[in-house]
Image (cartoon, grey):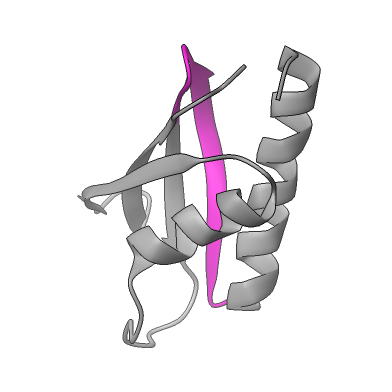
Amino acid sequence: MTGLAEVMKAVKTAVETFNNWLMGDMELVIDSIRDGTIKALVKQNCACSLDFSLKEEIENAFKEAGLEAEAEVLGWDVERSGYKVEIRLKNPG
């Protein structure tokens, strides 16, 4: 990745990929992007239990979009009914 526009397009693709994989059960929503760090929320739209690693699914979605990223699940946001997530792009361009 070289330019900001390319990175933003890849981030959008990663979000769409994650959301398609989870088919509406969970939804990745970007809150902010600053200096290669993405603050996001993964909304849980169902009462289903997680039988996968949220961290790995996010990282894999970014990898599919051509971005190397490291995700960290920071905890549950009670008010927004979702997991707070921080995603660090390793080579944001």
Tell me what residue is drawn at x 62 percent, y 16 percent.
93
The region drawn magenta spans 25-38
For the question of whether residue 21 can be seen, the reply is yes
Most foreground residue, 63 or 30: 63
Q: Is residue 86 above or below residue 90?
A: below
Q: Is residue 43 above or below residue 84?
A: below
- Give the percent coordinates (x, y) of residue 3: 75, 14
- Give the percent coordinates (x, y) of residue 51: 33, 87
Tell me what residue is drawn at x 58 percent, y 75 percent.
22
For the question of whether residue 24 can be seen, the reply is no
The answer to if 32 sits in the magenta stretch is yes
Can you name the residue that lies furthest to the left here?
Answer: 75
Tell me what residue is drawn at x 67 percent, y 44 percent.
66
- Give the percent coordinates (x, y) of residue 32: 51, 24
Most foreground residue, 38 or 70: 70
- Residue 12 is drawn in which quadrant? top right
Q: Is residue 75 above or below residue 46?
A: above
- Give the percent coordinates (x, y) of residue 71: 36, 46
Residue 86 is left or right of residue 16, and the answer is: left
Which quarter of the rendering shows the N terminus?
top right
Most foreground residue, 88 or 78: 88
